[in-house]
Image (spheres, helix red, strand yellow):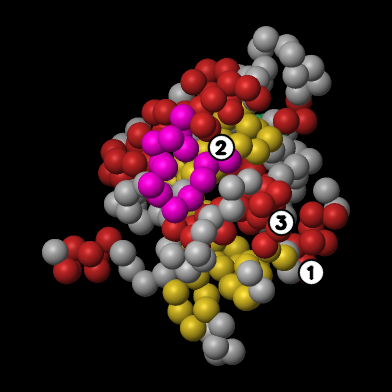
């Protein structure tokens, strides 16, 4: 039992030289092929946007350090962001991909309803393989920049997504995080920083570092302050 715990729950926090706590947080990007997982990650890492479908081979990850202040206390976070190729059907790759993650960014393409319908399958796969039980999830409706008419029947409606979010929050009622829905664009950067900022607070609450998780983006803003560099990113969007 003890060694099993050790094996599945490696240390996530280290003290930096200045005495600050540095959290290492593995996140996975989930969603059907071509919903924009690689593009969203590239946008977050400041790598720009391309119209080409970006080839992801197997699975790979990139890391980014961020500084957030929650309830007046500074936190250094290293996000390790995993990106899986849609065609990776090998179970061994998939279970390695999810293992030990602290959160899932669940993407669908707002212009492709089938990618929304598949969300429960992705969430089941995360549950089965994370080795940490229920971990925080954020639902991201990507390609928001392509939506010109929200009432178009080929566009996934916000009401439909909210229904799913409410249902998920029902099943996670006893967990220390709330599922939210954000419209994102990997092209314009809409809500990309917000998604990771919210995920940071959710994971720290899940780890019992913060006393509670934010309920929504407004709530997040109430008790957090972005560092100067992150505010500059947001202002440029
Ligand atoms: N307009 C628009 N296109 C996007 C967006 N995100 C991704 N794409 C495009 O969708 C295609 C698939 O993106 P990619 O990141 O490779 O998807 P992945 O398979 O989920 O990793 C590419 O042609 C991207 O340029 C977005 O937010 N807006
Ligand atoms: Mg990809």
Residue 134 against residue 150 in the figure, above or below? below
Check residue 221 in the rendering and tell me which mark sits there, or answer none: 3
Q: Furthest residue to the top?
A: 153
Tell me how far mark 1 sits from mark 2, CA to CA. Answer: 27 Å
Residue 26 visible to an observer of this rendering: no
Check residue 139 in the rendering and tell me which mark sits there, or answer none: 2
Q: Nearer the viewer, mark 3 or mark 1?
A: 3
- What is the magenta range? 167-180
Badge 1 density bin: few <14, some 14–19, many ≥20, Cα 10 Å: few
Badge 2 density bin: few <14, some 14–19, many ≥20, Cα 10 Å: many
Residue 70 visible to an observer of this rendering: yes
Residue 63 magenta: no
Check residue 228 in the rendering and tell me which mark sits there, or answer none: 1
Q: Position of residue 100 (x, y in %)?
A: 35, 56
Q: Furthest residue to the left?
A: 1
Residue 214 against residue 126 in the figure, above or below? below
Residue 179 magenta: yes
Looking at the image, tell me whether mark 3 or mark 2 is earlier in sequence order: 2
Q: Residue at x 52, y 38 (%)?
A: 106
**Nearer-the-camera pick, 159 or 155:** 159
| CB atoms of marks 1 and 2 within 8 Å | no
Q: Position of residue 58 (x, y in %)?
A: 43, 43
Residue 81 against residue 110 in the figure, above or below? below
Badge 3 density bin: few <14, some 14–19, many ≥20, Cα 10 Å: some
Q: Residue at x 85, y 53 (%)?
A: 236
Quarter the N terminus occupies: bottom left
Q: Position of residue 160 (x, y in %)?
A: 58, 21
Residue 163 against residue 228 in the figure, above or below? above
Q: Nearer the viewer, mark 3 or mark 2?
A: 3
Looking at the image, tell me whether mark 3 or mark 1 is earlier in sequence order: 3
């Amino acid at each position: 039992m003890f060694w099993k715990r050790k094996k599945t729950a490696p240390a996530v926090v280290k003290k930096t030289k200045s005495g600050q706590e540095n959290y290492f947080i593995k996140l996975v990007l989930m969603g059907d092929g071509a919903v924009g997982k690689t593009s969203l990650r590239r946008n977050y890492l400041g790598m720009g946007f391309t119209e080409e479908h970006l080839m992801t081979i197997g699975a790979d990850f990139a890391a980014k350090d961020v500084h957030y202040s929650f309830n007046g206390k500074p936190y250094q976070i290293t996000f390790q962001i995993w990106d899986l190729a849609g065609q990776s059907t090998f179970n061994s790759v998939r279970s390695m991909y999810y293992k030990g993650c602290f959160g899932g960014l669940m993407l669908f393409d707002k212009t492709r309803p089938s990618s929304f319908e598949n969300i429960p399958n992705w969430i089941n796969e995360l549950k089965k393989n994370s080795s940490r039980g229920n971990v925080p999830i954020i639902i991201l409706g990507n390609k928001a920049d392509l939506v010109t008419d929200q009432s178009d029947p080929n566009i996934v409606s916000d009401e439909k997504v909210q229904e799913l979010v409410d249902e998920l929050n029902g099943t996670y009622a006893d967990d220390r995080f709330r599922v939210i829905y954000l419209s994102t664009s990997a092209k314009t950067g809409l809500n990309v920083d917000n998604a990771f900022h919210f995920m940071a607070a959710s994971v720290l609450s899940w780890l019992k570092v913060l006393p509670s998780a934010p309920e929504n983006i407004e709530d997040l803003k109430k008790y957090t302050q972005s560092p100067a560099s992150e505010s500059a990113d947001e202002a440029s969007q």
